[in-house]
Structure formats: structure tokens, C-alpha cells
Image (cartoon, grey):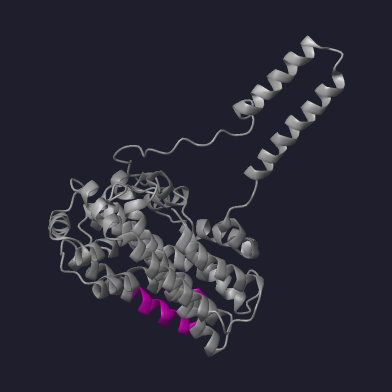
Amino acid sequence: MQRVLSPRRHPRAGQPPPCAGDEPSRRPSAVQDDEAHARRRARADPNDAATDRKFSRAVNAGTMRQDMAAQQPTPLELIRAPVGVDLAAADLAIRRELASDVALVNQIAEYIIQSGGKRLRPLLVLLAARAAGAEQRGPQIPAAVVIEFIHTATLLHDDVVDGSHQRRGRDTANEVWGNAASVLVGDFLYSRAFQIMVRLGSQRVMQIMADATNTIAEGEVLQLMNAGDPETTEQRYLEVIYRKTAKLFEAGAQIAAVLAHASPEVELALAHYGRHLGLAFQLVDDALDYRGNSSQRGKNLGDDLAEGKPTLPLIHALRTGSDAERALIRRAIERGGLDDLPAVTRAIESTGGLEYTARLAQSEADQALKALEPIPESAHKESLRQLAAFAVVRTY
């Protein structure tokens, strides 16, 4: 009998949305007021039935329009639509591949699955493969699982290194089970990803992913070296986000092309697309740390500052701010913490740090779009275009 390691404390799960049937549906108060007014008119003038019927139809039409608006798909849902079948298959494969004989692995793995996430990286793999000519339900399914597992492993390790307490609006695994369990389950995910790659039977995929994981590890070390260092340059910062974030996007798109047996030109094009998409994504993520919605992002504003990370908004403000602003930001980076967050945010805004970061993110998105030019037109290529656009306009 295995001993299951109990959580150090129960995770704070978010309040789930009410299920159908839990309580009567509630219409907006304006509609309720209109209906109440119609009932009062009917009691006051029972002979005016025709007018009441017209009024009731108008109320119902307004409610219908509200319901239709609520059912409109989100931009990300529209992007996912061409690979909906493959995404469902990938989700099933993720659950299947997470299974382990070790109870704690299953426990933490299920917690990670329930934490949700946008799953942009597996989506990228699936779209790139289909754009390169792969058939539905092809080898891109296990490849998407590989990319998601490596990404999740890096998150588990990141949260330990950074001492993070929350991710995606929930307690991190290290907050619940401790650092040792998080690191070891991260290792499990890395090794399981390579087991899946072996089954794919492609030496080229193994080579790309081995290089990618090594680059990601180097990026983590570079970021650790930059932490608390106000002398970090824009070039050093860009090197970190390429290695730490964009490299996995690049590798995911590239192995998708390899598994689709695409031409070298298409493989290179998709690799370049993934690289620029990943850079745009991370640049926006770093800007959102100072202007995002913490409930949507599942992270607190100022997390990077609290960890002493000199991201681009801070680097730009250091380069262009007044003497007082530069002194403030240097002190905040060196000390970490959130005591100076309001003043630092004002300095970033006054120097245009967020706008500068947004311009660079848009430039990377534009380069991602240009990289797609050799790819034949298809619904999947159009979703790749829309994914690049989403990366720079998103607010979470």
C-alpha cells in the first residue's frame, strides 16, 4: 500500500460557476423591470392585450439578443476551431500519459490538469502540423503532449526557484505539496515527454527537443543571473526570453513540420514563426505584469518586480527615466519585493515602458506573420495568423 502525501494545506480552488439547474436563471435587472412594467400595464388595462403582446415580444427579442451575444465564440475558440478534433484527442492523451503507479504523481498531475491554462503550445503544434499537410489525428497528437509536458515541467521548477505561491488563480503545487514533490513531479514530466518522443520514432524530433530542453535550462540559469541586477541590458533580457520561452514555441512548430514530412523550406518557415510568436507572447506577458488583470491572469501584478527580475518595461524606464526614477527602479530591482510597486509603475508609465514593450511585441508578431509566407493557404494557416494577432492583443 502506497502512502499518499497529503497536501500541506488544501488548495484554494476558485468558486465554480453555477451548474444548470442549480438555481433559476436570472435575467438582467433591466429586462426584469420591463417585464414587471408589462404586467402592471396588463392589470391596469386588460383590454390592451395587443399592445402587451407587442411589448412582450420586444422584451423577449432583447433577451434573445443578450443570450446570443453571450454565446459568441471567443477569439481563441475561433483559432482552435480548425483543429478541434485534434485538440480533444490531445487532451485525452495528456490525461492518459500522466498516469503513474506512484500515487503522488497522479495526485499532483490531476491538480495541474484542473488548473487549466490556454494550452497555446499544443495548439501551435497542431495548427502547424495541419498547415504543413498532416492528416487529422496524426503524430502531431503525441507531439503536442510532449510540448505541453515540457512546458508544465518548467512551470513546476520555475515556481520552486521563484518561491511562487499562486499560478492561474490557484495555489502552486509547491505551495500545496512542498518544493521536493514539485521538483520530482517536474522531473517525471520531462522523462515522460522523452518516452513519448521515443515512441514517435523520429531521430530528428529527438534532436530538436534535446537541443530545446538544454536551451531552456540555460535560459533559466541566465534569468537567475540577471535577477536583482539593474545593469541587465535589453540584449541580455531578449536572450533570456528567447531561451526560456520562445525556444519551446520554435521547437513545437518545427517538430510539427518534421512529423508532417514537410519540405525544408516549410520546416524553417514554421520554426521562425514559432520563435517570433514566442517572443511576442513573452513580451506581452512581461508588460501585463504591470498593467494586467490579476484575476484573469491568475498571477498578482508586480510578481516580476517582487522577484527582482529586470524585464523590458523596467529596462526601458531605467534607460530613459529621470535621475530620481532611475534610482527608484535600481533600488526596487536590487531589493525585490512590492514596496515600491506603485511608484515603479508610475515611472514605467511616464517613460512609455509599456508602449515600448508593446511595439517590440508587435514587431515580433509581424515577423511571425511574414515567416508564414511559404506555407500554402488553408484554414490552419489562417488560424496561425490569428494566433499571432491574439498574442499581442490579449489581456491575460
| Corner quadrant of residue 76 | bottom right
The image shows residue 181, relative to residue 374, as above or below, that is above
Q: Choose between 83 and 368: the one closer to the eye.
A: 368
Task: Name which residue lies at 39% across and 64% down.
Answer: 358
The answer to whether one can see residue 323 in this image is yes
| Corner quadrant of residue 195 | bottom left
The image shows residue 383, relative to residue 272, as above or below, that is above
Q: x, y (%) of residue 250?
A: 44, 75
Q: x, y (%) of residue 254?
A: 48, 79
Is residue 18 part of the magenta span, yes or no?
A: no
Lateral position of residue 375 relative to residue 310, left or right: right
The answer to whether one can see residue 25 in this image is no
Lateral position of residue 162 relative to residue 195, left or right: left
Q: Choose between 197 and 347: the one closer to the eye.
A: 347
Residue stretch rendered in magenta on the structure? 199-214
Is residue 200 part of the magenta span, yes or no?
A: yes
Task: Name which residue lies at 29% across and 40% down.
Answer: 8
Q: x, y (%) of residue 274?
A: 46, 74
Most extreme residue toward the bottom is: 264
